[in-house]
Image (tube, rainbow, N blue to C red):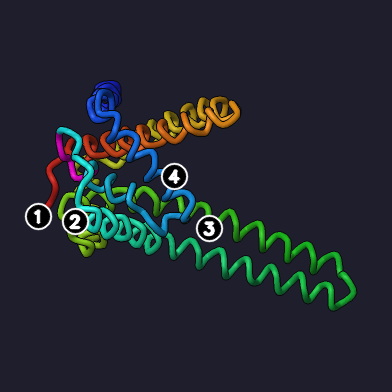
Amino acid sequence: MDYGTVISRSFEYTKDALVGKWMQWVILAVLSLVQGLTLSLIPLLNGYIVRVLAGKTPAPEIDDWVGLFVDGWKMNIITLVYMIPAILVFLIFGGLGAIGMLASEAAGGDPAAMGAAVLSLIGGFLLAGIVAIVLAFIALFALLRFARTGSLGEAFHFSAIFEHIGRLGWGTWIIAVIVLLIIALVYGFVVGIISSIPILGWIIVLFLNAAFAIFYARYFAQVYEEAPAPA
């Protein structure tokens, strides 16, 4: 896969979607703000991202607000379900660590018991993190399959998801995600600098966030299309 071409095409797609269509950009910036303030309880921006992930070209218009809301919540649900194993791992190990710390305090602060409890807590964090990372690679592809089919159930059609990733190549998919993460880190660094500008900085960041959301969605949509999807 030519990752440079994918990045370039994603940038062009984003530019065509926003530059010269200022009202659409303003609306998306507002949706970004609303979604952030409501902690994704009003996920209208996510709903729009689902349309971009679906491979629509040129970039879709902002309409059917009920559809945006529903698709945004479906995206939330898929993400949450895939993260449940990581949450459970953390709760189990974190809970054991917390119980151990309480027991240690009750026993007069036994250093050995306290150390074991702390190690259990740290181990829970690390193990949950590893599980979350592994699941995230699958969840991203699940979101793409959901967006392409329009079916929530297809996000959990594991045999089809694994077959599609296999056709694409696990190495190709992992590298694609890592490349996007590197871009996101650079973007985050730039945004951090811009956000330090009083008032105006945060307004600029809202617009940039909307643009970056379209960029990454189009990026993954192109990666998904590199291999034919199973039925």
- In this rendering, the answer to whether 131 lies above or below 105 is above
Q: Which residue is mark 3?
A: 128
Q: Which residue is mark 2?
A: 160
Q: Residue at x 42, y 49 (%)?
A: 34
In contact (CB < 8 Å): disc 1 and disc 2: yes
Of 115 and 35, the residue lying toward us: 35
Under mark 3, the amino acid is Ala
Q: Position of residue 195 (x, y in %)?
A: 56, 30
Of 72 and 55, the residue lying toward us: 72
Under mark 4, the amino acid is Leu
Q: How many residues crowd mark 1 within 10 Å: few (<14), some (14–19), many (20+)?
A: few
Mark 1 → mark 2, Cα distance in angstroms: 7 Å
Q: Secondary structure at mark 1?
A: loop
- In this rendering, the answer to whether 187 lies above or below 97 is above
Q: Residue 33 has which mark?
A: 4
* Residue 55 among magenta residues: yes
Q: Which residue is mark 1?
A: 231
In contact (CB < 8 Å): disc 1 and disc 4: no
Q: Secondary structure at mark 4?
A: helix
Mark 2 → mark 3, Cα distance in angstroms: 26 Å
Q: Which of the marked residues, 3 or 1, is nearer the chain's N terminus? A: 3
Under mark 1, the amino acid is Ala
* Residue 195 among magenta residues: no
Q: Residue at x 29, y 57 (%)?
A: 69
